[in-house]
């Protein structure tokens, strides 16, 4: 690592924490219904939403009612977005005259955006009308992220409340998260991106003359507004097929820095929000520390592998050709490796480099980051409630070690919570492994591969990991717009999202009904470096035990073969 690269990584982390600390406090106030500086403008709008939608903001829900409301809202969103895509040819703001999408692709896209995955088996600039992009995709970027925040705050209430049956009101949590957190940040973010040259218009596509005497069509559209929430909501779906490698989405090194900050600032801030809401900021710092340990390790491995490059490409004799394969010259190796790690430790999936061109070891890190279950900071809200799963598993293991009933924040972790936590880990893992296994043995799965051997397996592993982990990025070598992949990945996205949310809401309801056990001499402290290390270790061990055999057959064996001169 050069000194300049080290400074860039260090500068990014410092700015990120400095932004996340006050944001975490602000989000705690919003989610607890306290007065904030935005209430003068947005307070009346919030009340208007409740009045128009018939929401009783004072009525709270038990976990089952919360779950039913959440599922009804998201299923309705899937249906609405599906219909919108099927009739987009009849709707306004469609200067290119795009017709209806094929039903399986429309279904895949509807499930994708409603689950905060934003997997895109299509090229946005040649498929989606402006109306579909704005009224469909951008809206779901907001509400899918707000759904994640709502589940996270419901989990926090489960830990903080004593002997009650309610965990909040889903509609209130959804509204506050959208209006007072995501919307203001997105407005500021979009303006910053426009200042760097990200386009924002409703113009028809432009045809321009090139220096060679030919012509080229330049796609236009409302890009900045979607770009801001795509990053801030850890959604990831780009307006253009090239995503954040496209100069109209990410034109400058400063816009690249902004987008990397946008992706992580809310997930990191929510760890501090947790500390404020449980009245013990050390608890938030422990979650931050555990995630930071894994994030730094992953970034280091990814950067080291990419800066070393592929020795087979190095034989070409062009200086730097190996390290720069598949990367934007505007951003270089360090910002490509950092972006790839950021976008996969969260559920974002935006890319500024082609992951299919990463070295095998460099490609392993994004796959592993997704496989670990969105708990290395993770997606907006999703990262926090996913790391609670591993917190429960960690305190259970510690309880076995010290011979006590495990407890966290004074609440005993019992059989029901363990069953739900294990379910939340196993459900997406099962989708990843079974889906990849099925794709690898049937012609409908293997016919879409651009590469044979272990790299082909990596492409399939990445696709099902990205879908089940609600990430959305991809190895570009897989042609996923087929009936098999559209349907199979739709199922993986739906199960991977709600198969985690529902067990965790059950845990929240169970924990809210428990009394607090007083701290004693035998209570294991969860506010120190030891617990942060244990938590990080449990995350890695569970991920290794679950996925190492599959990874060994994919990127690991490909890395070994690369060293001896074999490519796939």
Image (spheres, rainbow, N blue to C red):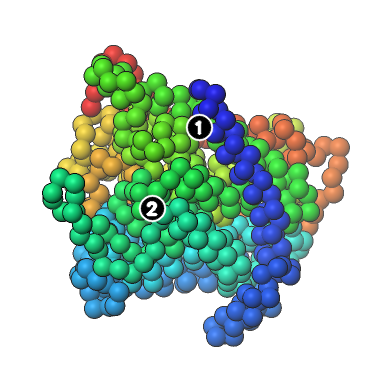
The answer to whether residue 212 of the structure is visible from this angle is yes
Q: Which residue is mark 2?
A: 249
Tag nearer the camera, 2 or 1: 2
Cα distance in 3D space between marks 2 and 1: 24 Å
Near-viewer residue (495 or 91): 91
Q: Residue at x 30, y 68 (%)?
A: 203
The answer to whether residue 379 of the structure is visible from this angle is no
Near-viewer residue (421 or 568): 568
Q: Which residue is mark 1?
A: 299
CA neighbours of label 1 inside 10 A, class few (<14), some (14 to 19), many (20+): many
At which x and y percent is residue 208?
Answer: 20, 57
The correct choice, above or below, for 197 with respect to 183 in the image is above
At which x and y percent is residue 220?
Answer: 30, 62
Task: Classify residue 224 as left or right of residue 535.
Answer: left
Task: Classify residue 278 as left or right of residue 467.
Answer: right
Q: What secondary structure is found at the residue carrying circle 2?
A: loop
Q: In the rendered structure, are the residues bearing label 2 and label 1 in contact, judged by CB atoms less than 8 Å apart?
A: no
At which x and y percent is residue 515?
Answer: 78, 57
Q: Residue at x 57, y 80 (%)?
A: 49
Q: Residue at x 78, y 49 (%)?
A: 280
Residue found at the very far left of the displayed protein: 213
Mark sitting on residue 371: none
Q: Residue at x 41, y 24 (%)?
A: 307
Quadrant where the C terminus sits is: top left
Q: What secondary structure is found at the residue carrying circle 1?
A: helix
Residue found at the very far top of the displayed protein: 564
The correct choice, above or below, for 55 with respect to 28 in the image is below
The correct choice, above or below, for 353 with respect to 2 in the image is below
Q: Quadrant of residue 464?
A: top left
At which x and y percent is residue 141?
Answer: 45, 62
The number of callouts visible is 2
């Amino acid at each position: 690592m050069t000194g300049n690269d080290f400074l860039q990584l260090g500068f990014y982390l410092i700015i990120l924490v400095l932004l996340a600390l006050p944001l975490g406090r602000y989000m705690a106030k919003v989610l607890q219904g306290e007065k904030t500086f935005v209430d003068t403008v947005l307070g009346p709008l919030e009340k208007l939403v409740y009045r128009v939608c018939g929401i009783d903001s004072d009525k709270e829900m038990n976990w089952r009612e919360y779950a039913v409301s959440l599922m009804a809202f998201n299923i309705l969103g899937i249906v609405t977005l599906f219909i919108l895509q099927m009739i987009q040819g009849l709707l306004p703001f469609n200067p290119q005259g795009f017709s209806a999408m094929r039903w399986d692709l429309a279904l895949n896209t509807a499930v994708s955006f409603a689950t905060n995955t934003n997997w895109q088996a299509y090229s946005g600039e040649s498929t989606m009308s402006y109306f579909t992009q704005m009224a469909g995709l951008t809206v779901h970027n907001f509400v899918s992220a707000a759904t994640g925040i709502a589940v996270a705050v419901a989990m926090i209430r489960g830990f903080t409340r004593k002997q009650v049956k309610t965990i909040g009101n889903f509609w209130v949590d959804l509204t506050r998260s959208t209006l007072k957190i995501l919307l203001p940040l997105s407005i500021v973010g979009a303006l910053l991106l426009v200042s760097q040259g990200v386009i924002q218009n409703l113009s028809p596509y432009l045809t321009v003359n090139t220096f060679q005497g030919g012509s080229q069509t330049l796609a236009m559209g409302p890009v900045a507004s979607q770009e801001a929430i795509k990053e801030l909501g850890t959604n990831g779906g780009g307006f253009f097929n090239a995503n954040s490698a496209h100069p109209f989405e990410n034109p400058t090194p400063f816009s690249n820095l902004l987008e990397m900050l946008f992706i992580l600032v809310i997930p990191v801030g929510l760890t501090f929000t947790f500390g404020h809401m449980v009245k013990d900021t050390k608890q938030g710092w422990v979650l931050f520390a555990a995630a930071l340990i894994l994030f730094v390790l992953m970034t280091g491995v990814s950067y080291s592998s990419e800066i070393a490059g592929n020795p087979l490409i190095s034989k070409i004799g062009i200086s730097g050709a190996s390290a720069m394969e598949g990367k934007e010259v505007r951003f270089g190796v360090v910002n490509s490796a950092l972006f790839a790690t950021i976008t996969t430790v969260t559920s974002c999936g935006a890319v500024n480099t082609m992951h299919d061109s990463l070295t095998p070891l460099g490609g392993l890190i994004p796959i592993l980051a997704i496989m670990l279950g969105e708990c290395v900071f993770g997606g907006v809200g999703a990262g926090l409630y996913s790391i609670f799963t591993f917190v429960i598993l960690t305190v259970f293991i510690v309880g076995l070690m010290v011979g006590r009933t495990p407890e966290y924040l004074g609440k005993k972790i019992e059989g029901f919570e363990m069953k739900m936590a294990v379910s939340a880990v196993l459900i997406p893992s099962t989708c990843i492994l079974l889906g990849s296994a099925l794709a690898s043995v049937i012609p409908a799965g293997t016919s879409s591969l651009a590469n044979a051997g272990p790299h082909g397996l990596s492409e399939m592993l990445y696709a099902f990991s990205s879908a089940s982990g609600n990430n959305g990025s991809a190895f570009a070598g897989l042609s996923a717009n087929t009936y098999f992949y559209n349907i199979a990945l739709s199922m993986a996205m739906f199960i991977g999202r709600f198969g985690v949310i529902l067990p965790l809401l059950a845990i929240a309801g169970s924990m809210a009904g428990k009394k607090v056990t007083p701290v004693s001499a035998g209570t294991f402290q969860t506010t120190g470096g030891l617990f942060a290390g244990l938590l990080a270790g449990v995350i890695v061990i569970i991920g290794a035990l679950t996925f190492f055999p599959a990874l060994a057959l994919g990127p690991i064996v490909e890395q070994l073969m690369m060293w001896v001169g074999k490519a796939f």
